[in-house]
Amino acid sequence: MESNKLLKDLFLTVRNDYAGWEAKQARHNPSPFVTMLGQAYYDRRMSSLLVLQAVSQYCAGMRDRNLKFELIAEGYVPFSRGFSVRRCAAGMFVDAVTQEARLRPGDEVLAINRTAPERIVKNLPNPLLAADEPEREQWNGYLKLARDITVRHADGTEEMLELARYPVDTDAAPALRELPGGALLLDPGSMNDAEALEAFVEAHRAVLDGCSRLVLDLRAAAGDDEEALLPLLPYIVKADCTAAEAFGDRRIRTNYTKVNCTRLIRMLTPYLVDEDPALRQMAQQLTAYYRDQSGKGWVDEVEELPVPAETPILRRGPEKVVVLTDTWCEQEAERFVQLAKQQGRAVLLGRPTMGTLDYTNPVMVEYDEFIFTYPISRTAASLEGEGVDERGVQPDVLVPWTPEECTADLLAQKALTL
């Protein structure tokens, strides 16, 4: 596909079919995005990677992590830098290391591409980091564009490292660890596999139910399997209830343009010939529904539950339950935190979550070697001024992030005092 046609189609899709356009267009400014690619075109240095970087910046300007642009060209392998960084008033620090053995949590980042982080922030278009507060800034994308990083280690030595590429991290598995005083900390992992999490919780049901205090660690959970919430719900509901009561308000408004419906039907096409008859039937029903909705524009609906509405959710576990939250808690983990806050049984401790719940129902569209994903529904809460966009779900006990958390789990320690 010619690049100018791709850019025009993307811009029109966001303007006409993206659920968040009206709410976000006031801050949206596509000019840097257009200028970057336009200059590259005239300089004859246009490439798929450059398009990926530019459109990703365009999406960052909308500050909605439901907007995604991916390169699927043969030979391109998504990568990470093997570590993450976080910034506060004291500076920028390596807060987690997954694969980069040359770094340690707590290393201070003095420069990226030989430029101090605070200077980078001052010179960058603000939407690129997708946040106004330093501790909520999203630096992973910027690090992928960088060549080197200068750090100060714990022993005071300074080192400039050429950044390496590592495979994208796999999903984290559930984990359980003991805390002082008979308390337990349950980390549900990525929450992308409901069956695995359910099996894990069931295998440890006795100790989870009998502990003196349960700490649910949702700080880095970002999975998209809503059924993964089910084995955890008994530990945050204040009384026995049904699934419909536990999940609460599911009202949404969906933008059923002709383009959106055509793309939804195209996404269902492979399932119309699937070997599973139940899956084929569901695809047929949805296809018929989208054909009927095509061109109707905004339609008020109620989002389906992951289980039958009457499914019982029975209260379990100790009286004292604490949920740890942070910026990188998003998608279904963030929904769980929202439900916990609505129930009022557990204490939410930490920082606000990512704030991505207001827009839902993703649509995928392929452009040759790219895939663009955008949501077409908005929650009724966001339309009524009660959404969490960018702000996130607010904790009951706010603890600003500090560099000390790079090497010590201060939130888990504080959870024992609530």
Image: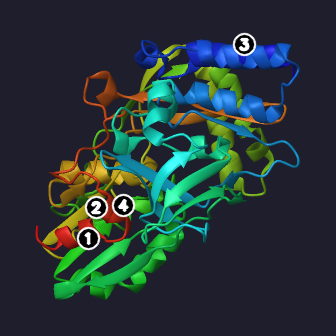
Tags 2 and 1 touching, CB below 8 Å:
yes
What number is the disc on residue 324? 2
Give the residue type that dot 4 points to: Leu
Residue linked to disc 4 = 218
| 131 to the left or right of 4 | left
Q: CA distance from mark 2 to mark 3?
A: 42 Å
The residue that appears at 34% across and 74% down in the rendered structure is: 186
Q: Which mark is residue 412?
A: 1
Residue that badge 3 annotates: 8
Circle number at residue 335? none
Q: Residues within 10 Å of mark 2 (few under 14, many from 20)?
A: many
Helix, strand or loop for disc 2: strand
Which-is-in-front pick, marks 1 and 3?
1
Q: For the residue marked with disc 2, what is the amino acid?
A: Leu
Label 1 vs 4, first from the N-terminus: 4
Above or below, 185 against 264 in this view is: below
* Image position of 260 (left or right of 367): left
Query: How many other residues sit within 10 Å of disc 3, few (<14), some (14-19) or many (≥20)?
Result: few
**Which is more foreground, mark 2 or mark 1?**
1
Quarter of the image containing the C terminus? Answer: bottom left
